[in-house]
Image (cartoon, helix red, strand yellow):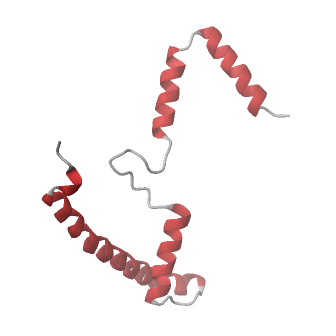
């Protein structure tokens, strides 16, 4: 069968994206440094950042908050699919099932 990872075009795409990712990282680091040094020292009287401090800040923000990109798999941040699934379940429930669900929810999450 066709093995995608051994296909020559697939390897070329991977090789192409590695420099693009590095260029994007260095460009974003420069943008963080430029925006920080243009705005924050004048407004909040903080010290200006060096390029490598800006790169570190960018990595720290990525670790703490993520960028929110949702790849092909639909992963990423957000709960849109969960809300959609819950709406579908709610629409399929009878009135009695909804009442039981509401009561269980109040028992678990209600004020104590």
| In-image side of 99 versus 70 (left or right) | right
Q: Could you tell me if residue 36 is visible in this image? A: no
Whether 34 is drawn above or below 112: the answer is below
Residue 111 is at least partly visible in this image: yes
Q: Who's the residue at 28% across and 71% down the image?
A: 18
From this view, report whether residue 16 is shown above or below residue 27: above
Quarter containing the C terminus: top right
Image position of 5 (left or right of 70): left
Can you give x and y, in whole percent of width and height, for residue 55 in the image? 45, 80
- Indicate the quadrant where residue 17 lies: bottom left
Looking at the rendered structure, the number of numbered marks drawn on it comes to 0
Please, which residue is most extreme toward the front here? 1
Give me the residue at 17% from left, 45% from top. 2
| Image-based side of 109 in relation to 15, left or right | right
Which of 8/76 is in front?
8
**Residue beneath the point at 55% across and 82% down:** 43
Question: The N terminus appears in which quarter of the rendering?
Answer: top left
Q: Percent x, y for residue 49?
A: 50, 88
Furthest toward the right, the residue is: 112
Residue 6 percent location from the top left of the image: 19, 56
**Which residue in the rendered view is the most extreme toward the left?**
8
Residue 62: where, in percent of width, then height?
49, 67
The residue at the point 46 percent across, 31 percent down is 84
């Amino acid at each position: 069968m066709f093995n995608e990872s051994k296909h020559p075009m697939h390897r070329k795409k991977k090789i192409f994206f590695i420099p693009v990712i590095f260029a994007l990282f260095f460009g974003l680091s420069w943008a963080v440094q430029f925006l920080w040094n243009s705005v924050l020292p004048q407004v909040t009287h903080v010290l200006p950042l060096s390029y490598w401090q800006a790169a570190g800040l960018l990595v720290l923000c990525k670790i703490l908050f993520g960028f929110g990109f949702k790849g092909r798999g639909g992963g990423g941040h957000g709960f849109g699919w969960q809300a959609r699934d819950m709406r579908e379940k709610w629409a399929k429930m009878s009135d009695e099932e909804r009442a039981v669900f509401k009561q269980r929810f109040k028992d678990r999450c209600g004020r104590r």
